[in-house]
Amino acid sequence: MYHLFMIDYHLHGNFCGHAEGELEEYVLEALGKGFVEIGFSDHLPKVVNPDPYHAMLEERLPEYVALVGHLQRKYAGKITIRLGIEADFFPGFEDRTRSLLASMPFDYVLGSVHFLGDWHFTSKAHRDRYETEDPGVAFPRHFELLGSMIESGLFDVLAHPDALRKERFVPPLPPEREYAGIAALLAARGMAIEVNTAGLRRGAGSIYPDPALLAACHGAGVPVTLGSDAHAPVDVGRDFTLAFQLLERTGVTEIATYEGRRMTRRPIGEFRQVAGSGRFYDMLSGGEALWRKQHEPNRP
Ligand SMILES: [Zn+2]
Ligand SMILES: [Zn+2]
């Protein structure tokens, strides 16, 4: 029997230059799969070296906000749509980031690290660097950045906290002390941590975060959000059956939701869907392979 959650707080769209699909296509995909709540979290314009292939340029931010507002009204009563944003943390540019975030009525802000110095480690264009970078240098630096990011107080949710990790690029020693530190900082700041299924399809070989980090956070009372990090409509809610299993194993019983940057913890039962009881699973019950064939003809 499959279980999954019908809430997805990490959706991109064609504003950021490296994702495909109109925002409305993501809404329709979510509706078709039986989701009850979604949040757009496209990339906030970079406050340093603007790059239209990483994030929308600043002049398009009002358009993004207006479009999400339009979709909220158009689909009211059918699905809850939140206005989120995924913001990079650039040390030294906190004030600029704060004022940009305050300029729009966001429901929540995902905080992310995608850059280590000049290494845009989540970008396909910089993938070669994994061959030459030293994990013994990169991970300590990354943990330090995550700590500063949390302490900045700019963000609501720590997104994909170990996106640096790949199957063969891991911390030299199990970073238990660092995980405990992150968990304590998140708890002190009232932030949530994101469970993000993109790790399964971006070379990490498993969901972000590392289960040990999730366990440390859960143990410290840190709430959890869920996201697919979809950069194409078909990826909405992708691999949420596995997310369900991870959360169940970890003992998580609540999901954090946001409105106007205020968090509410809700029982996971509100979002749980069981095989056969929703349209998504009506499709899946005929076989996941069939569903994938219909939706993802070009994927192996
Ligand atoms: Zn992206
Ligand atoms: Zn990201």
Image: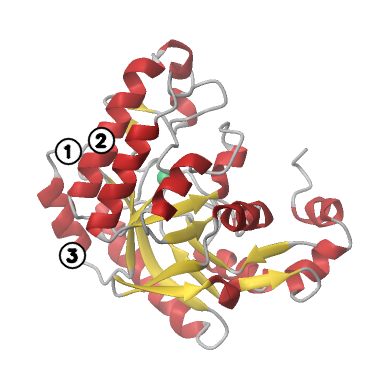
- Whether ligand 2 has any atom under 8 Å from the Cβ at mark 1 is answered as no
120 or 205, which lies in front?
A: 205
Residue farthest to the right, as pictured: 286
How packed mark 3 is, by other alpha carbons closer than 10 Å (few <14, some 14-19, many 20 or more), is: few
Does residue 112 appear in this view? Answer: no
Quadrant the C terminus occupies? top right
Placement of 256 over or under 153, stated as above or below: below
Q: Amino acid at mark 2?
A: Leu
Which residue does the image show at 55% across and 40% down from the upper left? 199
Locate residue 270: give its quadrant: bottom right
Locate residue 261: give its quadrant: bottom left
Specify whether 40 is left or right of 268: left
Specify whether 217 is left or right of 35: left
Q: Which mark is residue 145?
A: 2
4 or 130, which lies in front?
A: 4
Placement of 246 over or under 213, stated as above or below: below
Q: Secondary structure at mark 1?
A: loop
Quadrant the N terminus occupies? bottom right
N-terminal label among 1 and 2:
1
Measured as percent of width and height from the top left, residue 116 is found at 30, 28
Does residue 153 appear in this view? Answer: yes
Q: Secondary structure at mark 3?
A: helix
Q: Secondary structure at mark 2?
A: helix
Disc nearest the viewer among 3 and 2: 2
Q: Which residue is mark 3?
A: 102
For the residues labelled 1 and 2, say whether their Cβ atoms are less than 8 Å apart: yes
Measured as percent of width and height from the top left, residue 52 is found at 35, 43
N-terminal label among 3 and 1:
1
Q: Which mark is residue 259?
A: none
Disc nearest the viewer among 1 and 2: 2
Q: CA distance from mark 3 to mark 1?
A: 18 Å
Q: Which mark is residue 91?
A: 1
